[in-house]
């Protein structure tokens, strides 16, 4: 039996399991199935807002509301910020960090670069600050192991934050430490190849404290940005956008153009050189992969 239109409520999707979805509204949790038109999980993702109707004693998702943003990796919708977790081990992949930031900026999503496992000795925090200090909204360090989480809690409050990063950087460990429990399975770093074992397989929204909303996601090491036109790439480098009006050419790509402010600032050390060289490499790769 369908209820009146006035009884239709908008719930947030917090977990997707084949065709069963867990949804939440003001602390109330329900389980629902989806109308066939949404097909599989790909059509409804964690973070979506859904209209739900009761039917045959259960709940059915009848509509997904328009999304303010959407990420394929990590699969999520309507998030406020992407928290990119990095650790001394597994070895960080700076291309992956750059690409996560590109995708986030393309969707208008804020970014935080967060060093976890800061209990391990490394020079990584300084490196992250010099590469992303003028790019990400915050660059912070924490340790799930030592329960040192205050800098992260500070940036999480009042927002829906999605964790992203390679397998075994500690996304689930941080989720557990924030929750004060062990509800998320934690894996190990393979000593053989120093890579994670993809312990988490499904994204899920967790609410460890009132006002803290996080999405623990499966780790990955490959991220394709080939759908981005190379002419647009510089737009997702906020530190280049800030200086592009100082370049001689309007819509300077900061590659071979004369009198380019970005290249000048890279030479003088004001803009990070490693990040610029990766930008250039990605630009060339996107350009060369363009099919005519
Ligand atoms: N030393 C140290 N180890 C940590 C810390 N946080 C997590 N680890 C370890 O890192 C390993 C991987 O942790 P997970 O939480 O499973 O990593 P994940 O990012 O969720 O990995 P996937 O689910 O595979 O993407 C485990 O052995 C944790 O004990 C930390 O702050 N310090
Ligand atoms: Mg995990
Ligand atoms: Zn330029």
Image (spheres, grey):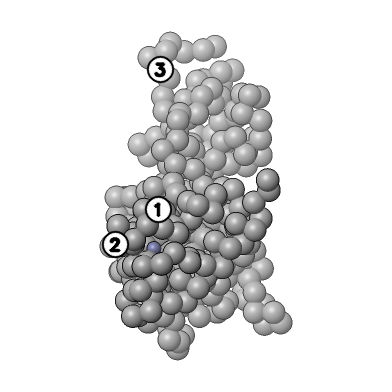
Q: Going 63% across and 24% down the picture, which residue do you hit?
A: 37
Q: Secondary structure at mark 3?
A: helix
- 138 and 5: which is toward the camera: 138
Q: Is residue 143 left or right of residue 57?
A: left
User: On the picture, is 186 further left or further right than 212?
Assistant: right
Label 3 close to label 1 by CB (< 8 Å): no
Say which of marks 3 and 1 sits in front: 1
In the rendered structure, which disc, 3 or 1, sits on the residue that comes first in sequence? 3
State the image coordinates of residue 17 (x, y, percent, origin top left). 62, 42
Measured as percent of width and height from the top left, residue 254 is found at: 43, 64
Q: Residues within 10 Å of mark 1 (few under 14, many from 20)?
A: some
Q: Which residue is mark 1?
A: 251
Kindly indicate the quadrant of the structure image that contains residue 40: top right
Above or below, 112 relative to 62: below
Q: Which residue is mark 3?
A: 7
Q: Residue 246, labelled with which disc? A: 2
Q: Quadrant of the C terminus?
A: top right
Identity of the residue drawn at 54% across and 11% down: 1
Q: Distance between the Cα atoms at labels 3 and 2?
A: 56 Å
Q: Position of residue 248 (x, y in %)?
A: 34, 61
> Secondary structure under badge 1?
loop
């Amino acid at each position: 039996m369908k209820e009146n239109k006035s009884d239709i409520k908008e719930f947030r999707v917090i977990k997707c399991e084949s065709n069963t979805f867990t949804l939440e509204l003001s602390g109330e949790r329900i389980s629902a199935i989806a109308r066939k038109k949404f097909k599989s999980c790909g059509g409804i993702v964690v973070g979506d807002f859904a209209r739900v109707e009761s039917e045959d004693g259960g709940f059915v998702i009848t509509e997904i509301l328009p999304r303010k943003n959407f990420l394929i990796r990590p699969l999520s919708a309507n998030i406020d910020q992407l928290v990119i977790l990095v650790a001394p081990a597994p070895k960080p992949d700076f291309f992956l960090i750059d690409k996560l930031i590109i995708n986030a900026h393309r969707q208008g999503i804020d970014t935080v670069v967060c060093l976890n496992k800061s209990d391990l000795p490394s020079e990584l925090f300084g490196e992250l600050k010099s590469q992303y200090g003028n790019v990400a909204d915050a660059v912070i360090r924490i340790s799930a192991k030592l329960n040192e989480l205050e800098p992260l809690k500070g940036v999480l409050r009042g927002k829906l934050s999605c964790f992203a990063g390679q397998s075994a950087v500690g996304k689930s460990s941080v989720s557990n430490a924030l929750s004060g429990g062990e509800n998320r399975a934690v894996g190990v770093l393979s000593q053989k190849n120093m890579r994670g074992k993809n312990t988490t397989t499904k994204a899920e929204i967790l609410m460890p404290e009132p006002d803290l909303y996080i999405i623990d996601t499966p780790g990955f090491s490959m991220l394709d940005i080939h759908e981005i036109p190379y002419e647009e790439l510089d737009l997702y480098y906020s530190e280049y956008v800030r200086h592009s009006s100082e370049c001689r050419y309007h819509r300077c790509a900061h590659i071979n153009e004369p009198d380019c402010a970005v290249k000048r600032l890279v030479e003088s050390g004001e803009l990070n050189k490693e990040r610029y060289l990766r930008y250039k490499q990605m630009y060339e790769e996107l350009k060369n992969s363009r099919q005519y």
